[in-house]
Amino acid sequence: MNGELSVVYEARSPQAVSDRALVLHSLGIPCEIVNGDFGAALLVPAEASERAKYEIWQYEQENRPSKTKAAPVPLPGHKGGLVGVFVYIVVLCVIAWLAGEFAFGRNWFAAGRVDGELIRQGEWWRATTALTLHSGIRHLLGNLGFGALFGFFAGRLLGSGVAWFAIILSATCANLLNTLLLESAHRSIGASTAVFAALGLLAGFVWRSRFMIQDRWPYRLGPIIGGIALLAYTGTGDEMTDVGAHLTGFACGFAGGLILTVLKTNLENPAIQRLAATATVVSLALAWIVAL
């Protein structure tokens, strides 16, 4: 080529320069390649340099490498998930027996159920004690089954101690919130609030920790969608079902799961797990001691 030339592309790779030269040739833009010690350069007539740079930019945009799909973060696997489940089953069964026998000469249902008016007067412990009371064997068995299932998964994900402390705390907060949202005459019992707190805890922690991250949005929102689907399927029951408690349980559990992602690097510490497990048992015992 004659006349003044301009460099429109430089690279260490001769192949990269050659590819862009082919693009310019196909568009009728004259060019030539100059090789040097440190790579190669693509030259075009000065009057065609702006168009050549634009066409090279277009080629690079069209051939930009696709994003590499982010690999899912591996799920943690804590040991001892069954220990928390065993304690959960024992606690509910023992309290069901004690309440049925009116142990210590007290009416455990009157002393421990959620009562909106009394909670508003300061009897906060009812939000916890009500989680361990049930109206009959069917009510008890249902909460034992679902609670054991979700509690086991939460224990494997977070460690039994932290998982059950978070479940009890979230469920207590949910009962308090539900009481504030409903009329003062509202009364309820049952571990179902804790069951849905466990479900929300799983959904929030898995989603925020990006354990199921994918390029497509349905996968990214999978834990939330799955949790809401289970809530809708198992938590809306008949007219006797406390839907408000289920919703607030899931919401408070979900919030707890989000908070725990900040602390997840500490969940492997056995001392923290033991401390959380102790706090769970003590909080339940203290609530019942105050109630009785």
Image (spheres, rainbow, N blue to C red):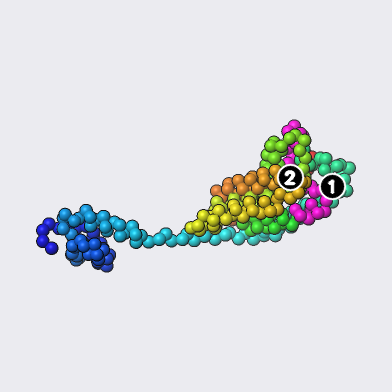
User: Horizontal placement of 9 versus 151: left or right?
Assistant: left
Residue plotted at (75% across, 53% down): 143
Which residue is label 1 attached to? Answer: 99
Q: Position of residue 93 (x, y in %)?
A: 80, 53
Quadrant of the image occupied by residue 242: top right
- For badge 2, the amino acid type reads Asp
Q: Position of residue 131 (x, y in %)?
A: 75, 46
Question: Does 204 appear above or below 18?
Answer: above
Which residue is label 2 attached to? Answer: 242
Residue plotted at (54% across, 61% down): 74
Q: Which mark is residue 239?
A: none
Residue plotted at (29% across, 56% down): 57
For the stretch drawn in magenta, the main secondary structure is helix
Q: Secondary structure at mark 2?
A: loop
Magenta-drawn segment? 116-143
Residue 128 is one of the magenta-drawn residues: yes
User: Horizontal placement of 208 versus 95: left or right?
Assistant: left
